[in-house]
């Protein structure tokens, strides 16, 4: 691609995302809906101005990493720890329920192959952290009890999803599962989450010290972005998704983070506020690219709208994709309105579901109709879940106040 062509595409992405987000907000819908719809409008589904490519995917990856950094930065670590047991229950229930239900439906009702059914079940286990958190932020509930439980559960879902994806992809290639390799991946990710926040906390002290000594106004954004990118790379090196590296860095730089084993490192409130204020414009620049890229990944023109198999598979999978995600939420000891909204917040599949579906297609596991049915399930849960969550809070939010 020539430089001027890419610049026009980037212009279309940024301007359309901003306009559509404002339109969505004016209609009472979350801004993320407009950004997702922007990708559908300018992408292959409608106007065909922009096609997804490696450069856009790279910018989208940076966007979701920066978004998760902001999420970590605004997270109350104490509340996240308090929500730990409930978050684990929500994550495991929301992982096992869709996996079993999706596999059973595909294998026994639609007579799909074993590996295709496993990939379908795996795709339904996903939860998009970025979309879920952005939606909760839009209704100012990211720091609520349900927000912290959902955040912890979504992070755990991503970890479990990476391990499952590694198993399924290896099985699709070799015909067998190597549990030793899966164990290594899980162990590496556990080590990363134990060490990364402590290392980031120590490095932030150096950045804060330099900020007091130097007069360069660009010091904080350059050093913090460099730190986030480093931890994203470190996460990949440990076998974890890059976006979780951004989350770990944000957690460590949060004013509410503390080191384990009683280690106390003084954090300047003024420095933390500087980080938040100077990083916010960077996050707001890159994050919409990620959501637009999700919309660009969908090509609604390729769908055979007259296929009975397509409608049967996609509609039943949509029902399972929504209902099965409530499994874990219904098992925790919280008022029903809170459990219900946690279940809704776990529904969006987004980029994680697209990764599962994309790898299944690349490995030759899916036929065209099965792949497009999965894409429709991901599109529905991604596009409409934020709208339903906001509507729920409008009418039932009073029952969720602590």
Image: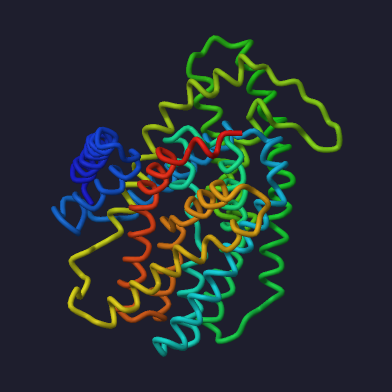
Please report the residue visible at 48 percent of the width from the left and 65 percent of the height from the top. Answer: 323
Q: Residue at x 22, y 39 (%)?
A: 16
Q: Position of residue 34 (x, y in %)?
A: 28, 42
Residue at the image point whose x is 42% and y is 35% from the top: 138
Q: Position of residue 286 (x, y in %)?
A: 38, 37
- Farthest residue in the right direction? 261
The residue positioned farthest toward the left in the image shown = 47
Scheme of image coloration: rainbow
Position of residue 224 measured from the top left corner of the image (x, y, whole percent): 55, 29
Foreground pick, 92 / 401: 401
Count of labels in the image: 0
Specify the quadrant of the image occupied by residue 321: bottom left
Q: Quadrant of the C terminus?
A: top right
Residue nearer the viewer, 306 or 195: 306
Q: Quadrant of residue 322?
A: bottom left
> Is residue 123 placed above or below 331 in the rendered structure?
below
Q: Is residue 141 left or right of residue 43?
A: right
- Judge left or right: residue 251 versus residue 37: right
Residue 110 figure quarter:
bottom left
Residue 99 drawn above or below residue 208 = below
Against 175, residue 273 (above or below) is: above
Point out residue 153 in the picture as x, y percentages from the top left corner.
Answer: 60, 52
């Amino acid at each position: 691609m020539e430089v001027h062509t890419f610049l026009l595409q980037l212009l279309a992405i940024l301007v359309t995302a901003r306009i559509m987000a404002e339109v969505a907000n004016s209609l009472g819908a979350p801004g993320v809906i407009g950004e997702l719809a922007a990708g559908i409008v300018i992408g292959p589904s409608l106007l065909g101005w922009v096609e997804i490519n490696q450069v856009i995917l790279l910018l989208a990856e940076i966007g979701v990493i920066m978004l998760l950094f902001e999420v970590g930065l605004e997270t109350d670590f104490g509340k996240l720890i308090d929500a730990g047991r409930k978050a684990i229950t929500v994550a495991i229930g929301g992982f096992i329920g869709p996996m079993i239900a999706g596999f059973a439906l595909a294998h026994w009702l639609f007579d799909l192959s074993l590996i295709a059914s496993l990939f379908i079940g795996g795709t339904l286990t996903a939860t998009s952290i970025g979309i879920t958190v952005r939606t909760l932020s839009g209704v100012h509930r990211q720091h609520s009890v349900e927000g912290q439980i959902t955040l912890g559960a979504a992070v755990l879902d991503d970890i479990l999803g990476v391990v499952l994806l590694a198993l399924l992809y290896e099985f699709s290639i070799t015909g067998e599962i190597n549990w030793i390799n899966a164990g290594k991946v899980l162990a590496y990710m556990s080590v990363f989450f134990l060490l990364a926040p402590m290392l980031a906390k120590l490095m932030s002290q150096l950045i804060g010290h330099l900020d007091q000594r130097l007069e360069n106004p660009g010091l904080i954004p350059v050093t913090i972005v460099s730190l986030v990118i480093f931890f994203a790379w470190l996460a990949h090196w440990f076998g974890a998704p890059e976006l979780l590296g951004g989350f770990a860095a944000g957690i460590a730089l949060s004013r509410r983070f503390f080191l384990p084993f009683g280690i106390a490192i003084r954090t300047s409130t003024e420095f933390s506020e500087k980080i938040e204020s100077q990083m916010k414009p960077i996050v707001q620049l890159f994050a919409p690219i990620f959501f637009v890229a999700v919309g660009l990944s969908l090509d609604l023109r390729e769908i055979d709208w007259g296929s009975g198999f397509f409608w049967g598979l996609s509609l039943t999978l949509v029902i399972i994709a929504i209902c099965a995600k409530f499994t874990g939420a219904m098992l925790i000891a919280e008022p029903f309105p809170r459990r219900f909204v946690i279940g809704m917040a776990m529904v969006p599949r987004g980029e994680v579901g697209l990764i599962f579906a994309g790898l299944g297609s690349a490995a030759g596991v899916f036929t065209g109709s099965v792949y497009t049915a999965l894409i429709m399930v991901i599109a529905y849960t991604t596009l409409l879940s934020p709208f339903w969550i906001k509507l729920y809070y409008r009418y039932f939010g009073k029952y969720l106040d602590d």
